[in-house]
Amino acid sequence: MTHIAITGATGFIGRHVLAQGAAQGLDVVAVTRGPAPARQDNVRWVSLDVASPPDNAFDLLGRPDVLIHLAWGGLPNYRARRHFEVELPTHYAFLRQLVEAGLPSLVVAGTCLEYGLRDGALDETHPVAPVTPYGFAKDALRQQLEYLQRDHAFNLAWARLFYMHGDGQAPTSLLSQLRAAVERGDHSFAMSRGDQLRDYLSVTDVARNLVALATSGKNVGTVNVCSGTPRSVRGLVEQWLHDHDWNIQLELGRYPYPDYEPIAFWGTRTKLDRVLETL
């Protein structure tokens, strides 16, 4: 049985990864900074702060076969210097400590914002050019871990996540704001024009893919975790309205497009599918 540890286990993605791992009967250790939540089958909770881990952190985690590292602070402010001044050194130090203690495999959440302002279909061979501190810090962590592999033998899957939707999203997310507007009884919902193209994948599918990468036992390197299908933001919102039978007028063009994203970009999942087919 594969022994998996998960940081960020109480977050949006982490809760779904935790559920996937437990459903598959894996031996799961979930990391939290606070008190352990209610008992769950196949899950053991460990209280540990990645910013100040004890020297025996690897042992406390039960010497796992693989760590799925989802923890990261400072979000959703992608522009904050905190990402490279605080988060980057904190997370590299924590992951290096585990690798040096013997961690065999590592799956880390990256971001499509590493690609910067490149339009169109993006694959893992495209050069990165992040324009936000968040994207820069994530890409820098990837490079640090690849350099660390020169001195220590461990598998690395850098999961470059695109956009997600599903239960438990932050209140600032598009779907959460739309739901809140409907529940308040608002007559309209203000948004951008909505014609920008994005790559959306349900968080359940994201979690399933992350667990698959974790149990692959392969040195995957960078891999897009995405749908591979471009979709307009407006189309997605209209689909949500239809699926939930919500009645609210869309106030299109109220907000400008974010200046840190290209107007149309999505991921290719050829590499991800190739990895999944071998499992």
Image (cartoon, grey):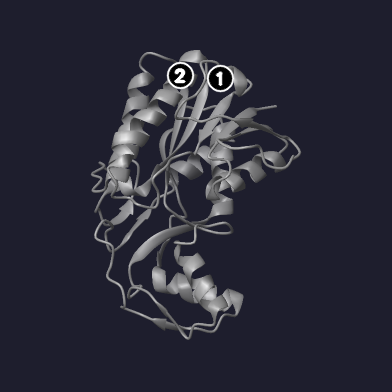
Mark 2 vs 1, N-terminal side:
1
| Circle number at residue 139 | none
Residue 262: in sight, yes or no?
Answer: yes
The C terminus lies in which quarter of the figure? top right
Q: Name the residue rendered at 44%, 25% in the picture.
A: 94
Give yes or no for contact between labels 2 and 1 (Cβ–Cβ under 8 Å). Answer: yes
The numbered mark at residue 58 is 1
User: Which is more toward the observer, 40 or 32?
Assistant: 32
Specify the amino acid type for callout 1: Phe
Residue placed at 50% from the left, 76% from the top?
181
User: Residue at position x 48%, y 30% from top?
Assistant: 50
Q: Residue 41's spot in the image, x, y percent?
A: 76, 38
Given residues 226 and 59, the one toward you in this image is: 59
Q: Give the position of the N terminus as an image quadrant.
A: top right
Q: SS class of the residue under badge 2?
A: helix
Residue 265 placement: quadrant: bottom left
Amino acid at circle 2: Gln
Position in image of residue 251 (x %, y %): 38, 82
Q: Please, what secondary structure does the residue beneath circle 1 have?
A: helix
Q: Nearer the viewer, residue 50 or 139?
A: 50
For image coordinates 34% across by 46% down, the residue present is 123
Image position of 20 with respect to 69: above or below: below
Residue 42 position, x and y percent, is: 73, 35
Residue 36 in percent (x, y) is at: 66, 37
Q: Examine the image and state in which quarter residue 97 appears.
A: top left
Is there any visible trace of residue 277 in the rendered image?
no
Viewer-side residue, 245 vs 272: 245
**64 versus 222 height, above or below:** above
Q: What's the mark number on residue 97? A: 2
Side of 53 where 37 appears, left or right: right
